[in-house]
Image (spheres, helix red, strand yellow):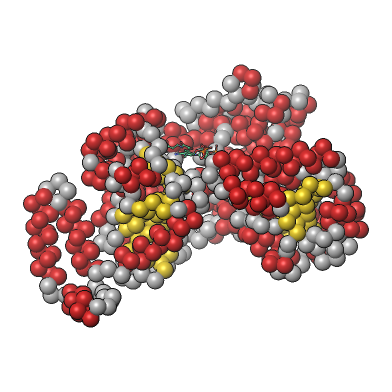
Amino acid sequence: MDVDDIETIAVLGAGNMGHGIAEVAALAGFDVHLRDIKEEFVQKGYDQLEWSLNKLAEKEQIGEAEAEAALDRVTPIVDLEEAVEDADFVVEAVPEKMDIKKNVYRELEQHAPDEAVFATNTSSLSVTELSEVTDRPERFCGMHFFNPPVRMQLVEVISGAHTDPEVLDLTEDLAEAMGKTPVRVRKDSPGFIVNRVLVPLLNEAAWLVEDDVATIAEVDSTTKYDIGLPMGAFELADQVGVDVSYDVLDYMQGVLGDAYEPCPLLVEKVEAEKLGKKTGEGFYDYDDGGADVPTDQIREDVADRLVAVMANEVAKLVGNDVADPAEIDEAVMLGAGYPEGPAKMADDAGIDYLYETLDNLYEETGAARYEPAEYLGTLAESGDQFHASAEDSEGDTPSFSSVAVSVDGKVGHLEIDRPHRMNTISGELLDELSEAVDVLAADDDVRAILLTGAGEKAFSAGADVQSMAGSADPIDAVELSRKGQQTFGKLEACDVPVVAGIDGYCLGGGMELATCADMRVASTRSELGQPEHNLGLLPGWGGTQRLKHIVGEGRAKEIIFTGDRFDPETMADYGFVNEVVANDEFEDRAWELARDLAAGPPIAQRYTKRAMLAGRDDTDAGLEIEAQAFGQLMNTQDLMEGISAFSADRDPEFEGH
Ligand SMILES: C/C=C/C(=O)SCCNC(=O)CCNC(=O)[C@H](O)C(C)(C)COP(=O)(O)OP(=O)(O)OC[C@H]1O[C@@H](n2cnc3c(N)ncnc32)[C@H](O)[C@@H]1OP(=O)(O)O
């Protein structure tokens, strides 16, 4: 079966995950049968699905007609036979209890077509065990969406012990057709990838407090503002539900052993029914303001221990061939909002250092959770890391994790690639951006650069304020400001024309980056602005100086002092945006403009950029460069080509000679 053969998808269970999956499937154009055991359950799921589609339309993320068409494709059903009899693909999202799921599969097997694929949306149960109650274990896999499916990009596609690889390919294709990013989990291993990394981290956070090593405030300050997770570990545990983490640990302990013993602190919370946000209290009291994580209680030893525990889980996954480091990093960034993947974090911290940290703790405490994984030991001993080190890839194009660089014809494409964090700009991203500009500038085939942000939400929402808050050292901040100014300045000064393709939020540092392009194209849904004053900051990556050259000082002050978000039409009036294009035409137009500029005369373009830049604050200097450049151009083949093409009434083919 090919993904094009899938017309009807049955989603079993209309709860939070079920109706969310149904929504995503309907938006992708599939006919969806949303089934639950009672009319009231299925209707509630259907109503929530409708609410969510309306919300997307309200926020202009989809059109109203699209929302209506998606809703029309969903049929709420109670009768199982009716729901699945003509289904090509079944996604099961019923409660996370082995018995309940097994009963559903037994019944499902009686009514579903023989060729239909069954996919369980379990977050922790054994896919293999579930598959074995059906007559089609080879057409059975895990398809683990994250909550809420409509917003979360990741889908873990899990192989059971019997799954046919073609079924995994099909399920990945289906996830892609739904606009998601699938990551393959090659073995049915407890917690798969994301929970396997995240939940032991939450457990270790609890052990740190249980053992009086650190306070909740210190652990959360460290996890949020040093490691850079979207929330503090305890805040996250409350968000996920303390019982959920406990259940996953309990299951892991049963299958994998005592390294996953739930910390008594978690057990106490579960017993006291203080399960987090959903019960109003967990580690924080949500009737009393909830979590207020301090920025200034970071502890290096706490970070070391948490990163070491994560590294150990990564090593176990890699060592057991469940997934490779790149897949693990992608899954954890997309599924848990990590700023960098855990394998990358471990490499940066130093594998041998983390190994030693674990080994010492294991010797001191004898606790199974600190026993270093065999694969971590192998890496530490050989001096290798999870990802190939810079030296290993010497001579090749450098590998980037936060930007993506490619060349298409004469256009170098530079994409900010942190869609899970609104393409916010961290210090590391600045380093990569700087290197990426060097790579493209050194490529003679590249005659224009197109700068975009990955995903549909943001070009870039600016500096990653969370990582800035955790390292608020004034001297470091001066250097960070200079680093941003200089990095963006490289683009401004590079010899080829640069087009910024702005789709979504273009704020703060993101707007300062776009300011350094030569031209800007924005989709109608974009919002632009310099909101730094709202945070008590100033546009410190060149915004106080460069913006005024494009929009004039009066408008630059308006943009900076109000801190407002502006629509692209207003920004076009102000002269910042060169063209505003419909959302669905944006990508084509940005590429078209970049290609047009790439076809221009490279030497004339280079000198024009230099003369204009030099003339910004010193017109005489700019005029002199202009005159000298004008003279240089007289001697070029490009000039001959331009004049010949003009005479022959054809398009010129400039070569840059
Ligand atoms: C020298 C340069 C300095 C600077 O650049 S300072 C930073 C300037 N930028 C800003 O002030 C923008 C701040 N962000 C926002 O105002 C809003 O966000 C948006 C308008 C961009 C989007 O709003 P919505 O669509 O409602 O989404 P959401 O839930 O607010 O954000 C989604 C996730 O993205 C994170 N995020 C957004 N912007 C930043 C940022 N600049 N630094 C760090 N994280 C950011 C949020 O926290 C959240 O994360 P979670 O999903 O984990 O809750």
* Camera-nearest residue between 426 and 583: 583
- The picture places residue 554, in percent across and down from the top left corner, at 24, 36
Residue at 67%, 28% in the rendered image: 277
In the rendered image, which quarter contains the N terminus? bottom right
Residue at 65%, 51% in the rendered image: 69
- The picture places residue 649, in percent across and down from the top left corner, at 24, 78
**381 displayed left or right of 74:** left
- The picture places residue 361, in percent across and down from the top left corner, at 62, 39
Report which quarter residue 135 is drawn in: bottom right
Any part of residue 530 in sight? yes
- Above or below residue 304? Residue 126 is below
**59 displayed left or right of 603:** right
In the rendered image, which quarter contains the C terminus? bottom left
Residue at 11%, 50% in the rendered image: 619
**150 displayed left or right of 271:** left
* Camera-nearest residue between 343 and 148: 148
- The picture places residue 252, in percent across and down from the top left corner, at 76, 45
Any part of residue 316 in sight? no
The mark total stands at 0
- Above or below residue 203? Residue 155 is below
Which residue extends farthest top?
Answer: 288
* Camera-nearest residue between 339 and 640: 640
- Above or below residue 258? Residue 344 is below
**339 displayed left or right of 233:** left
Residue at 71%, 32% in the rendered image: 242
